[in-house]
Amino acid sequence: MKPELIFDAKAELAEGPTWDEKTQTLYWLDILGKRIHAGMDLVAQLDDFIGCLALRQDGNLIFGKRASLLDLNLSTSQQSVLASVSEVATNRINDGKCDPTGRFIFGTMDIAEEAASGFVYSFDGRQITRLMEGIRISNGLTWSPDGKTFYYIDTPTREVKAFDYDLGTGQIANQRIAIRVPDGMGWPDGMTSDMEGNLWIAMWGGAQVTRWNPNTGQLLEQIPVPALLTSSCIFGGKDRNELYITSARKALSDVELQKYPLSGGIFKVTTKFEGMPTFRFG
């Protein structure tokens, strides 16, 4: 499996890939550029850091900007605030996505990536519920095919934690460590899962995406990516077997950019696996 460059975006920090099965469109964002894209088309230029987005049942987008969740009408470009969280001024929303029932799960982090001041929240359209605290860099999150296990990454821990997930209430329980990422592989960042229950993790600083068995903690596969800072991944395509990978070029030296000139690009690799669907909010 060899990734191909599909968008030479040169994004500072491309993240949050989201697949729209209805239109066969890849949405993604540039956190530092404060932009939302559909393919290479610019959907919205924002006035603050955007950390995550998801599709809505009504065709709009829900996205996290600084400490608020907003609705974006793709037809009119109108934005409206849905909810906000009370955070210290140095925090911002980072990764997030919808669970199988349509709740939006998202985390926050210290912009300087130093203080463990972040949280993980759940938003059901009416109220926000806090699920976790003491988070430093809230990143990858995904579910098992039956929706009963929630997987989560706080990047500096180098761990993927698993939780029992109650689809009825959205509550988590029985925290345990599913995967420990060894030093030297990069830092675990964005994550998705396939219909066999494997986890696919973008390795920040590792120039690769890795595939794991969360039941055994075993590393199953390493897919080299021609971008040092691979940031996230999601399955898409007509058969949902295409893995789309985002990357970044922020803080890379001239030497690193010469070695990885495609950094900040969006890549695609065709796999032998069917990925989990992208769930919609609402």
Image (tube, rainbow, N blue to C red):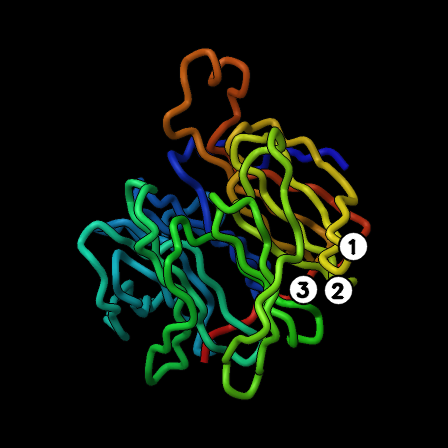
What residue is shown at x 47% (from left), y 77% (from top)? 103
The picture places residue 217, in percent across and down from the top left corner, at 73, 52
Q: Secondary structure at mark 1?
A: loop
Q: Are marks 2 and 1 in contact (CB under 8 Å)?
A: yes
| Lower sequence index among marks 3 and 2 | 2
Residue linked to disc 3: 276
Res 135 → quadrant:
bottom left
Residue linked to disc 1: 273
Measured in 3D between alpha carbons, the distance from the residue under mark 3 to the one under mark 1, in whole angstroms, is 10 Å
The picture places residue 136, in percent across and down from the top left corner, at 38, 50
Q: Tell me: residue 20, above or below residue 140.
A: below
Q: Tell me: residue 277, above or below residue 243.
A: below
State which quarter of the image contains the N terminus.
Answer: top right
Q: Are marks 3 and 2 in contact (CB under 8 Å)?
A: yes
Q: In the rendered structure, which amino acid carries the disc numbered 1?
A: Phe
What residue is shown at x 37% (from left), y 81% (from top)? 125
What residue is shown at x 61% (from left), y 29% (from top)? 184
Q: In the rendered structure, which amino acid carries the disc numbered 2?
A: Met
Q: Does residue 228 appear in this view?
A: yes
Q: Would you say 150 lies left or right of 238 here?
A: left
The foreground one among 42 and 229 is 229
